[in-house]
C-alpha cells in the first residue's frame, strides 16, 4: 500500500465520522507496532492538506519490559517533526511479577489506557487517536458475539466524559493486509511487543477464526464489516456526501 492510498482511506474515515475539527490537538498512541506507526504517518500526511488545521503529538506508554528499545521510533518522530513523549510505568512488573495475573490482558489494557489518557491530557491534547483498523472492528464484534452474546464493537468516535477527552479511530477503513503492505513498503521501525501473552489471547483466537471463515467463505470478513456499518449504533450517523 502506498502512502497516498493510506491517506485516502484515512480521510474517508475522518470525513464520514467528523473526527477532526479546527484547532484540535491530537495525540497518537504509539505502541511500537505496525498499526500505530502507520496511523502516525497517516495523520502527519493528512495534516499537510486537511481543511481543518490540527496539531499532532505522539505518546508511548512504556510498560516496563526490559529491552524495549524506542530509539528508532524516536528517530521516526523526529524525521516527521512530531513531538514525542515516552511515559515510563511499572505496569508489566505489577501485572506479571507482583499480581501474577493468569489473564493479564484486561487489567493491562485498563492501566495502559489510563496512563495514556493522563499523559495526553497533560500534553494539552483534546483528542487521542487509536490505531484500530478494519480487521480489529470485525474481530471485536466476533469476540462480543462469542463471549458476551451481543452484537457490539467500538465506535469510530468515543467521548470520555470523565477525562473530557475524545477517542478517534482514523484507520477504520484500512485492512490489516494494507497496513502490512505499508509497513513493508516504507520499512516502518516496528518494535516487537515483549509481552509474554502476545499471540496467546482471545483476540488472537478471534483473528484465527476469522481467517478460517474467510478462507472457507471468501468475502465474509467484508460482509461482516458492512453489517456493522449498516446496523451498529454509532456507525450509522455518517456524513452523507
Image (cartoon, grey):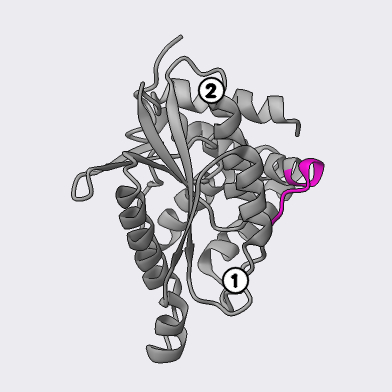
Chain-order first, disc 2 or disc 1 = 2
Q: Is residue 230 above or below residue 218?
A: above
Disc 1 is placed on an element classified as loop
Q: Is residue 95 magenta?
A: no
Q: Is residue 178 left or right of residue 61?
A: right
Q: Is residue 67 visible?
A: yes
Q: Position of residue 197 (x, y in %)?
A: 56, 76
- Identify whether 157 is placed above or below 180: above
The range drawn in magenta is 183-190
Circle 2 sits on which residue? 12
Q: Is residue 174 visible?
A: no
Between 80 and 49, the one nearer to me in the picture: 80
As drawn, which residue projects farthest toward the left? 162
Q: Could you tell me how far apart the alpha carbons at marks 2 and 1 are, in whole angstroms? A: 31 Å
Image quadrant containing the N terminus: top right
- The picture places residue 194, in percent across and down from the top left corner, at 61, 74
Q: Residue at x 68, y 47 (%)?
A: 214
Crowding around mark 1 (Cα neighbors within 10 Å: few <14, some 14 to 19, many 20+) is few
In the rendered image, the residue lying farthest to the right is: 185
The image quarter in which residue 7 lies: top right
Q: Is residue 42 above or below residue 37?
A: above
Q: Which residue is disc 1 drawn over?
A: 198
The quarter of the displayed image where residue 182 is located: top right
Amino acid at each position: 500500500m502506498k502512502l497516498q492510498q493510506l491517506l485516502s482511506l484515512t480521510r474517508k474515515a475522518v470525513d464520514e465520522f467528523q473526527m477532526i475539527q479546527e484547532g484540535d490537538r491530537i495525540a497518537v498512541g504509539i505502541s511500537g507496532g505496525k498499526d500505530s506507526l502507520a496511523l502516525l504517518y497517516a495523520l502527519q500526511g493528512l495534516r499537510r492538506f486537511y481543511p481543518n488545521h490540527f496539531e499532532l503529538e505522539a505518546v508511548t506508554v512504556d510498560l516496563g519490559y526490559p529491552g524495549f528499545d524506542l530509539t528508532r521510533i524516536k528517530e521516526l518522530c523526529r524525521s516527521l517533526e512530531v513531538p514525542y513523549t515516552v511515559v515510563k510505568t511499572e505496569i508489566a512488573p505489577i501485572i506479571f511479577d507482583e499480581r501474577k495475573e493468569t489473564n493479564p490482558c484486561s487489567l493491562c489494557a485498563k492501566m495502559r489506557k489510563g496512563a495514556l489518557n493522563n499523559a495526553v491530557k497533560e500534553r494539552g491534547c483534546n483528542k487521542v487517536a487509536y490505531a484500530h483498523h478494519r480487521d480489529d472492528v470485525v474481530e471485536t464484534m466476533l469476540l462480543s458475539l462469542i463471549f458476551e452474546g451481543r452484537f457490539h464493537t467500538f465506535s469510530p468516535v468515543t467521548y470520555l466524559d470523565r477525562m473530557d477527552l475524545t477517542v478517534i479511530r482514523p484507520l477504520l477503513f484500512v485492512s490489516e493486509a494494507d497496513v502490512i503492505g505499508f509497513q513493508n513498503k516504507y520499512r516502518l521501525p516496528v518494535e516487537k511487543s515483549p509481552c509474554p501473552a502476545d499471540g496467546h489471547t482471545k483476540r488472537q483466537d478471534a483473528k484465527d477464526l476469522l481467517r478460517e471463515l474467510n478462507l472457507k467463505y471468501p468475502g465474509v470478513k467484508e460482509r461482516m464489516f458492512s453489517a456493522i456499518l449498516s446496523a451498529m449504533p454509532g456507525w450509522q450517523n455518517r456524513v452523507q456526501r
